Amino acid sequence: MRALHHQQFLNLHQAGSMLLLPNAWDAASARIFEAAGASAVATSSASLAWACGYADGGALPPEELLHAVGNITRVLKLPLTVDMEDGYSADPAEVGRLAAELAGKGAVGINIEDGSDAPALLAGKIGAIRAALKGKPLFINARTDVYLRRLKVEGSPAQASVERLKLYQAAGADGAFVPGLTALPEAQEISAAVNMPLNLMAMPGLPAIAALQAAGVRRLSVGPAPFQVAYEHAKTSVEALLKQDLSPLLGPKLDYSAMNALLATDR
């Protein structure tokens, strides 16, 4: 099944329409997104960490990540790609082992980022992941944070991103992820220069999906936005409750029986 999901995931990056990838944080959210019609599901590192009771930014213990991913793949019948931040280690061998364990849990892809570290470190981690996989397929989406962190780089941010992404591709990456990029001409410049599917993240100022696709963007993920929307509604509903207003909690919501059916073991 995992091999089939991996091929499906590869095909989604080459299809005529852009891969619109919702980011889940647990088994329930992943199944809801599957039932909504998603073609594949990703995790958000921030959302998953928060759901497990940890801050984003490397604080999530790897064993918690593996446990959460196992819960998701147990109920999900779609390809799953997992955000593993920077691999939760500066040791490429440790990162390689974790990626192989995620593949063993059923993940068909990962995101791994350079952050503020030297690009050579991420290239080394990607090489170590390929070695640890021992030929097992895994879609490695290499993320560069040039735009997101507004890193000081030589040349333009687009040129620096291209240079990093080519390094990551040479190390074994399959996809290029540039969160924080919203300028259409720069997206077009990067997609034209890098021979990997370009992934952007939804954020304010991003052009329309049709325009992004025309510029060469192949994949759009949404990061922690679904978690933030859901938990903002939960927060405001409870605030209303504490003011003796039940209406938000008794208004439109997911049907109990439908939600239960989504997670039924005999489906």
Image: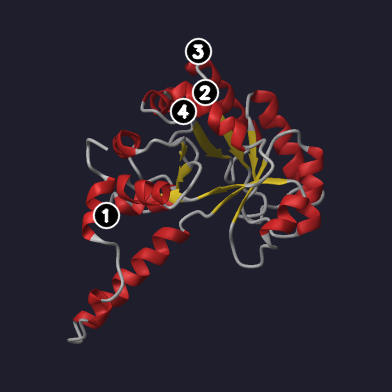
Expressed as whole percent of the image width and height from the top left, the position of residue 67 reads 29, 35
Name which residue lies at 38% across and 46% down: 30
Q: Residues within 10 Å of mark 3 (few under 14, many from 20)?
A: few
Mark 4 or mark 1: which is in front? 1
Quarter occupied by the N terminus: top left
Residue marked by disc 3: 134
Q: Earlier in the sequence, mark 1 or mark 3?
A: 3
Label 3, secondary structure: give it. loop
State which quadrant residue 197 falls in.
top right
The alpha-carbon separation of the residues under discs 1 and 2 comes to 39 Å
Viewer can see residue 76: yes
Q: Disc 1 residue type? A: Ala
Q: Nearer the viewer, residue 231 or 131?
A: 231
Residue marked by disc 2: 129
Residue 53 as seen in the image, left or right of residue 3: left
Name which residue lies at 43% across and 31% down: 107
Name which residue lies at 45% across and 27% down: 99
Q: Residues within 10 Å of mark 1 (few under 14, many from 20)?
A: few
